Image (cartoon, rainbow, N blue to C red):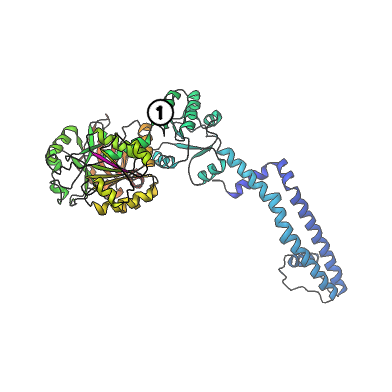
Amino acid sequence: MKTVGSHLASFLAGRNSLRRELAPFVRFLALLAAVVAVYAWIFHLIMEREGQSHSLFTGVYWTLTVMTTLGFGDITFQSDLGRLFSVVVLVSGVFMLLIVMPFVFVRAVYEPWVEQRNRARMKSIRALPDNVRTHVLICSNDPIAFALVRRLELANIPAWIIEPDEEIALRLRDAGLSVIAGDLEDAKTYKAAGVERARLVFANSRDQENSNVVLTVRELNPTVPIVALVESEDSIDVLELSGASHVLPLTQQLGEHLANRVSAGVMHANVIGRIRHLVLAEFPVVGSPFEDRAIRDLSLREELGLTVVGVWRQGRLLSARPEFVLSAQCVLMVIGTEEQLDELNEVLVIYNANTHPVIVLGGGKVGRAAAHALTERGVRVHMVEKDPVYAERGEGLVERIFVGDAADRRVLDAAGIADAPSILLTTHDDAMNVYLTVYCRRLNPNARILTRVTHERNVEAIQRAGADFVLSYASLGMHSVLAIVQQRELVVLGEGVDLFHVPAPPSLHGRSLAEAAIFTKTGLNVIAMLDASDAVSLPSADTRVLSGMTLIAVGAAADRERFGATFR
């Protein structure tokens, strides 16, 4: 960041601009010097008349002390004429130095400097440096963009946000974000953003604007991958025909991911992601043989070969410490092969058979997508929707629709909340979702409550309210784009938890995981490892980290930052 001195030096470097801009201020300084000289001469005349003798510099000294209202009082006139002259000098000094001089300085010096500084800053955000390559261009500064930029930084992938408003772009730049200003529909913007050198372009605006973005970018770079968000299902074909490489109907996918975490029917482990041939899955502890037992006593590793990744409780992923006792509110996350997971399901199949309907609160796009995904799995679904129009759109997707307010106890009782195995909160109002989470938790303490949030700032509030799983639109969008950028399968664990692929730093080479104590020092939990041949395996405490390995770890973004600072 440039200092004030460097900006002033840049301002003064332009001689023609200097003469033009500083001329009024220079003329004022010349006038001020002339006034001081005249007052110093009159000072000597009056002093000689009073019989006092002073040096030439003393006259200047006295004039300046009086004009600046300092008035040291060490040199004074004895006559009324001298005192009258002092008053004239004082009043003119107040007018010239305290009123006129600041005004002239601001207009002739400060404002031109600020304007030139802003012009230089504006110029700096209208184009990327030529050395920026393999970067990601993001076409809107929505919540997905902010989360994505931070996550890409952890992966050492440069990302730039395109912002049409230059003032907003400057504020984002001052906040530490990489921003370029330009019109999204202007090809010059993408040329200045180095689209021909980009790794990926993310069109995350409205459907119509995204279509223009895709067409413009595709004309400039026929091969760059373009990921486009879509709000309406009818726009999917349009964006694909425009040239988008990937189209993300996030609203629909949000409902599907919520449905994938539902516990209903015969107990089994839900698959939530894959890493090569390994499978990440989770299952509720309530009603299983694992309830009220410590993790060390489960013997999942010894008997089934599965590794416990963590424990979900009230929407937070906790570390799987050996002494951790599993309560009825816990959901266990494990990793292993398909065969090992099948063996686990054979153990779970005889427990906790709850065939009552799952309740979906909200019949909007997310609610209907979740209901459709559950129905496809053979799960019975009841939906509660206050708006008759949305309720009508849900006809045929669910077993029954209850038209009414989800905050009405009678409506929830009729929908079967007392026996529901899971409850999905899909409204777009975060405050309502927090309220309904508390309400539903009181009405059914054993149900698994899954909810969406619109703003990430409300995640902690809804977790405190008792939600078992929380997923935001921004988080899902960020993970989806990141998976495409890194060419990996999408794995969405939950709010505040990420799956990181971390190249093993030299400081870990030759050390076992137990010796490294990665979790203790950073909070990252290593759940799998990729060797130099890209083969994945489940590590143990004695597994040694070798050169060329990649650690696959679970944790928060802050944990990843601590890892980078601890191990180099």
Percent x, y for residue 130? 52, 31
Q: Is residue 400 left or right of residue 169?
A: left
Q: Can you give x and y, in whole percent of width and height, for residue 90 in the image?
A: 77, 67
Residue 158 lies in what quarter of the image? top left
The stretch in magenta equals 380-387
Residue 267, by quadrant, is top left
Residue under the image location 48 percent in, 31 percent down: 208
Q: Secondary structure at mark 1?
A: helix
The picture places residue 155, in percent across and down from the top left corner, at: 38, 38
In-image side of 222 versus 250 (left or right): right
Q: Which residue is mark 1?
A: 236
Residue 302 belongs to magenta span: no
Q: Nearer the viewer, residue 37 or 455?
A: 455
**Pick the front one: 290 or 200:** 290
Mark 1: amino acid = Ile
Number of disc labels: 1
